[in-house]
């Protein structure tokens, strides 16, 4: 027993010291719809007198939250019926229960959750095209030195769980989540039997919460209006960072292409080679911190470089099924979605392969939401396995575990209906609010404050956010 405890102690130390905050202080803030922006994040030290959850304590009254490790700051459309807001509020809290009964969260995760008309509030919907059901993303990515020595962008919720002694400064909330109150496809607990064109709102929420925890890749086309090349997130330091959200004036320093935490586990299936090797080759384009007169000068130089050919190859991988996967801890590959033609940012790469995971316990992280099925009747879509009742499948859990989340025992047998009482279906959570605006201390990362930019307005294109669509 003594030797076993020593091993556990050493493993914990290894986990802590392998994730070291980088000296860089450039974080990335991520609106749900619109363009990301860099933010200076000074390194801060945590101590017993300055706990990691100090922000949590200032935003949420833990006495009214039921002791959960996911804190929902809920905002509902002012024009929505109170009964609808109440149902959405309950669904948010039930989805939170699923996640916190799957993962052993060490520090509370704060979710800025909104149930509003997406097309009127902060995005533009195209007539005749499917409306997004919703989206979620980390509110902030922080640069952290990973166990392989590479500096990657970690979602804030994950950095909190690592409980580092020193880390870049946190944002007030960890996850941004917005969902469409104007959609008639959502089915809520307590509604009549689900229709053939409806989707269980709680399934949508759990899917998007996992994106907020870090189930996202950085690979996207950040340079072209019509996608034709893929890179990880390009990182810059601007000489005039306050010029605004459009193309900035003045010189820029290129600080490299940066991966997200999940990208560490991405491989090409033809030889199981890591995509990090490609990232390293892309970063040979020029020395880090090379200064360019402006964004256009950088783009002109990069597109003429031999490294740019790699970005075209990656784009072809993104539209060819079976080319890219997540390497699981057991050595198995989980195929990512690379079959969509034309390429769909937010769907390609940041979801598992739609066909490979159909009729399986890992159906949840496909890019389309399943219709006419509820969380209480998962066996019709989870491979008819009555013993697996958690909508978060075992491979999905393994992926989040590889990122650094701790898994609870018997996570696969958790069932939300076992935790739901009649009172839950009629009474909103005490720590939620129903209002058309957030309190001032919540507005720092409010996605509603952003505006959608066209692809030609900036070198840095709208940020990749995983969007779930119902067809």
Image (cartoon, helix red, strand yellow):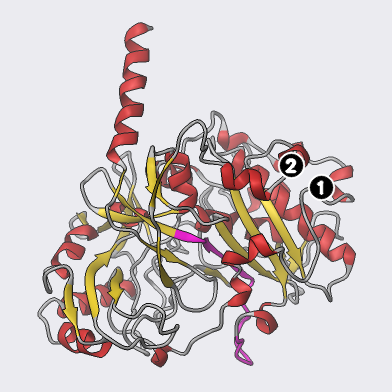
Measuring 20% from the left and 87% from the top, which residue is drawn there? 293
Q: From the viewer's perspective, is residue 451 above or below residue 93?
A: below
Measuring 35% from the left and 13% from the top, which residue is drawn there? 4
**Left/right of residue 163 with respect to residue 325 in the rendered view:** right
Q: Secondary structure at mark 1?
A: loop
**Left/right of residue 379 with respect to residue 246 in the rendered view:** right
Q: Earlier in the sequence, mark 2 or mark 1?
A: 2
Which quadrant of the structure image shows residue 322?
bottom left
Which quadrant of the structure image shows residue 282?
bottom left
Measuring 64% from the left and 67% from the top, which residue is drawn there? 178
Measuring 65% from the left and 60% from the top, which residue is drawn there? 441
Residue marked by disc 1: 430
Q: Nearer the viewer, residue 403 or 337?
A: 403
Which quadrant of the structure image shows residue 372?
bottom right
**Residue 65 shows which numbered tag?**
2
Residue 68 placement (x, y as % from top left) = 67, 39
User: Gap between marks 2 and 1, in whole Å?
Assistant: 7 Å
The span shown in magenta is: 124-140
Whether residue 130 is in magenta: the answer is yes
Q: Nearer the viewer, residue 424 or 13?
A: 13
Which image quarter is the C terminus in?
A: bottom right
Can residue 317 be seen from the camera position used here? yes
Can residue 373 be seen from the camera position used here? no
Q: Secondary structure at mark 2?
A: loop
Which image quarter is the N terminus in?
A: top left
């Amino acid at each position: 027993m003594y030797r076993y405890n020593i091993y556990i102690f050493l493993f914990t130390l290894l986990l802590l010291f392998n994730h070291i905050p980088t000296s860089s202080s450039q974080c990335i803030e991520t609106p749900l719809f619109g363009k990301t922006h860099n933010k200076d994040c000074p390194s801060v030290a945590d101590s017993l007198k300055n706990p990691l959850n100090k922000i949590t304590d200032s935003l949420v009254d833990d006495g009214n939250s039921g002791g959960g490790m996911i804190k929902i700051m809920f905002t509902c459309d002012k024009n929505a019926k109170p009964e609808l807001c109440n149902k959405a509020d309950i669904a948010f809290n039930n989805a939170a229960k699923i996640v916190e009964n799957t993962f052993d969260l060490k520090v509370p995760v704060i979710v800025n959750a909104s149930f509003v008309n997406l097309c009127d509030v902060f995005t533009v919907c195209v007539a005749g095209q499917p409306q997004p059901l919703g989206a979620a993303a980390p509110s902030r990515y922080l640069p952290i030195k990973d166990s392989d020595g590479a500096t990657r962008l970690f979602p804030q919720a994950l950095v909190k769980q690592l409980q580092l002694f020193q880390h870049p400064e946190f944002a007030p909330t960890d996850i941004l989540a917005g969902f469409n109150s104007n959609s008639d496809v959502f089915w809520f607990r307590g509604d009549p039997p689900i229709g053939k064109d409806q989707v269980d709102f709680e399934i949508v929420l759990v899917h998007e919460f996992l994106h907020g925890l870090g189930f996202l890749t950085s690979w996207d086309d950040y340079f072209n209006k019509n996608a034709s090349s893929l890179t990880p997130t390009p990182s810059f330091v601007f000489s005039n960072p306050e010029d605004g959200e459009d193309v900035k004036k003045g010189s820029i320093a290129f600080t490299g292409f940066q991966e997200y935490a999940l990208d560490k586990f991405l491989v090409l299936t033809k030889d199981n080679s890591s995509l990090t090797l490609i990232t390293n080759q892309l970063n040979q384009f020029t020395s880090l911190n090379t200064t360019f007169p402006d964004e256009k000068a950088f783009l002109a130089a990069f597109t003429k470089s031999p490294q740019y050919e790699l970005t075209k190859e990656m784009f072809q991988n993104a539209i060819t099924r079976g080319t890219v996967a997540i390497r699981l801890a057991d050595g198995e590959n989980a195929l990512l979605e690379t079959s969509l033609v034309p390429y769909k940012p937010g769907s390609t790469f940041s979801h598992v392969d739609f066909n490979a995971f159909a009729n399986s316990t890992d159906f949840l992280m496909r890019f389309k939401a399943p219709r006419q099925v509820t969380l209480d009747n998962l066996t019709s879509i989870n491979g008819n396995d009555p013993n697996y009742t958690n909508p978060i499948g075992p491979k999905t859990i393994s992926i989040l575990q590889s990122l650094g989340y701790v898994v609870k025992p018997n996570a696969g047998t958790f069932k939300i209906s076992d935790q739901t009482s009649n009172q839950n279906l009629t009474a909103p959570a005490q720590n939620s609010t129903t209002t058309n605006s957030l309190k001032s201390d919540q507005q720092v990362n409010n996605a509603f404050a952003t505006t959608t930019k066209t692809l030609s307005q900036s070198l840095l294109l709208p940020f990749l956010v995983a969007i779930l669509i119902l067809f």
